[in-house]
Amino acid sequence: MGDSTMMGRIATLTSGLEAGKTPIAIEIEHFIHLITSVAIFHGVIFFGLSIILDYSWLEAVIFLIGIIVANVPEGLLAAVTVCLTLTAKRMARKNCLVKNLAAVDTLDSTSTICSVKTGTLTQNRMTVTHLWFDKTTYAADTSKEQVGD
């Protein structure tokens, strides 16, 4: 019972899944690491130049911080949000509603989406064909003449 049933195994498998990062999140993280490296490199270079040119330690540190801050792209968040919103609008024209903007990138790069529409196959009715009770399997009446609540 419980985890040893098929539903229990499915529940165990799905509860163990970790939410992965979307492709755009991976790219943005890579871009941030690259910009951070460039900013720190420039800051250290200009700090060294400031010391060589006989600026005080305080002025050199202020210059270092200024160079690092100046390399931060302020419009990155706005640009990414606008791009994802435009993509969501394009998908909405194709009757695809997206609640999470980060999922837009993943969905937009998808070529095939498979889904199951159970109601079409079962005619919105569930029928019991076999019943397992007390370690015995019983066949159920599936004829159209059966009466029940």
Image (cartoon, rainbow, N blue to C red):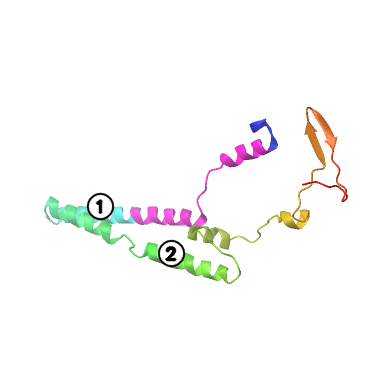
Q: Residue at x 42, y 53 (%)?
A: 29
Give residue 2's position: percent from left, percent from top.
64, 32
Q: Residue at x 29, y 53 (%)?
A: 40
Magenta stretch: residue 27 in it?
yes
Q: Which residue is mark 2?
A: 81
- Residue 44 tag number: 1
- Residue 25 tag number: none
Magenta stretch: residue 29 in it?
yes
**Range drawn in magenta:** 7-36
Q: Residues within 10 Å of mark 2 (few under 14, many from 20)?
A: some
The reply, left or right, for residue 135 in relation to residue 10 is: right
Q: Residue at x 43, y 57 (%)?
A: 28
**Residue found farthest to the top:** 135
147 vs 144, nearest the viewer: 147
Identify residue type, mark 2.
Thr
Q: Which of the marked residues, 1 or 2, is nearer the chain's N terminus?
A: 1
Identify residue type, mark 1.
Val
Determine the secondary structure under disc 2.
helix
